[in-house]
Image: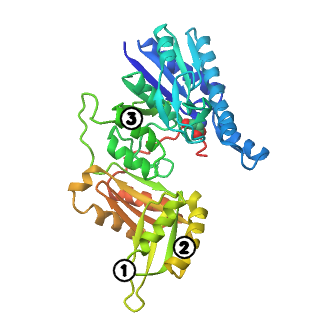
Amino acid sequence: MSLVVQKYGGSSVADAEGIKRVAKRIVEAKQNGHQVVVVVSAMGDTTDELIDLAGQVSPMPSGREFDMLLTAGERISMALLAMAIKNLGHEAQSFTGSQAGVITDSVHNKARIIDVTPGRIKTSVDEGNIAIVAGFQGVSQDKKDITTLGRGGSDTTAVALAAALDADVCEIYTDVDGVFTADPRVVKKARKIDWISFEDMLELASSGSKVLLHRCVEYARRYNIPIHVRSSFSGLQGTWVSNEPRGDRKVEQAIISGVAHDTSEAKITVVGVPDKPGEAAAIFRAIADAQVNIDMVVQNVSAATTGLTDISFTLPKTEGRKAVDALEKTRAQVGYESLRYDDQIAKISLVGAGMKTNPGVTATFFEALSDAGVNIELISTSEIRISVVTRAEDVNESVRAVHTAFGLDSDSDEAVVYGGTGR
Ligand code: ASP
Ligand code: MG
């Protein structure tokens, strides 16, 4: 008998109607002869509401209590879902992450899964139940405290359980029909991708695509768990993310998988840096010591007359303050002239393993932006990705222009967004 793990996101279980709709779909999978393990997120925007609430009682809640609070969201949806399934005449049992054997380190708010011991889940499904597991949470190995895996962590719970249970597939149900060639909220003519490799999906995720988190794809690749991303609203075939194309239809990988965008980053420019050995090292040592992760880095050619150069890099906006503070402390040592901080930027990336062997991809990308009148501020490339930084206000137009230039537009406006507030 095959075992499937299904994960339902917050927008799929946003209200009682949603929970009943999802319950029906789960029962169908069971009736089709599968053992079913379900991972569920908190209803709608519950997690955000709990975070707001915590902020109202304390400006800096302790990590332990914060996690205890947030995990309540998933406990509500798991219990309601189990009730809804029982109401359809099927047996279901709900489990917290801890009961399901999700063991983590003790870093509250962004714990990492160390081990999964799903004995109770296995017993439950072997006895004929549908097992419902609260996503996004676990228990720390040393202190036995409740932890959370970071925002959007339920996907990772699902893949981790799928790996531990040796499931045939991990189905991730969301509010769009799969992975699209661009964010369907921005590009109406975005096309659903039938199959994408782990490699390209990882690159899309790290370039800002929100449909799957990087960590979840990373986990799936490590354990070779095929992911099927699909909508809980439409029931259509979604996108398979795996090592090899699935099914009888051998899909050839496209040259370009898609266009991703990211408006969560800021840019820091260190102006007037003396062009001599050790300067860049000192700057980035300071940034690293402040525990800030950077993304793109560009150093200008120094002006011959002054011997000074500018160094720019991007980083998450949320780390902006920390990075600027750290750099200000090194000012005397580095001897730069000034710092510029700019959070009105966007990053647009083109991803596809096929670009390695296809000349002209970079030229077409830049031409599309230039035809749209968009100025490029920074550029970085990898073997399967080209990224540029532009003004934030140009982001939607840039994504659409690049999408069209690479022939990715579909003939119909097929990209439907079924739910979610995008919050
Ligand atoms: N409820 C959590 C969040 O909103 C986890 C998840 O949805 O995956 O981040
Ligand atoms: Mg959520």
Picture coordinates of residue 408 (x, y %)? Answer: 34, 51
Report helix, strand or loop for mark 2: loop
Residue topped by disc 1: 301
For residue 330, which numbered disc appears in the image? Answer: 2
Picture coordinates of residue 59 (x, y %)? Answer: 74, 50
Front residue of this view, candidates 289 and 133: 289
| Amino acid type, callout 1 | Val
Q: Earlier in the sequence, mark 3 or mark 1?
A: 3
Observer-side mark, 1 or 2, equals 2
Q: Earlier in the sequence, mark 3 or mark 2?
A: 3
| Residue at 40% over, 81% down | 275
Picture coordinates of residue 41 (x, y %)? Answer: 58, 32
Q: From mark 3 to mark 1, how far is it between C-alphas?
A: 42 Å
Which image quadrant is residue 81 in? Answer: top right
Q: Is residue 17 above or below residue 148?
A: above
Picture coordinates of residue 308 (x, y %)? Answer: 43, 84
Residue topped by disc 3: 220
In the picture provided, is 231 more to the left or to the right than 80? left
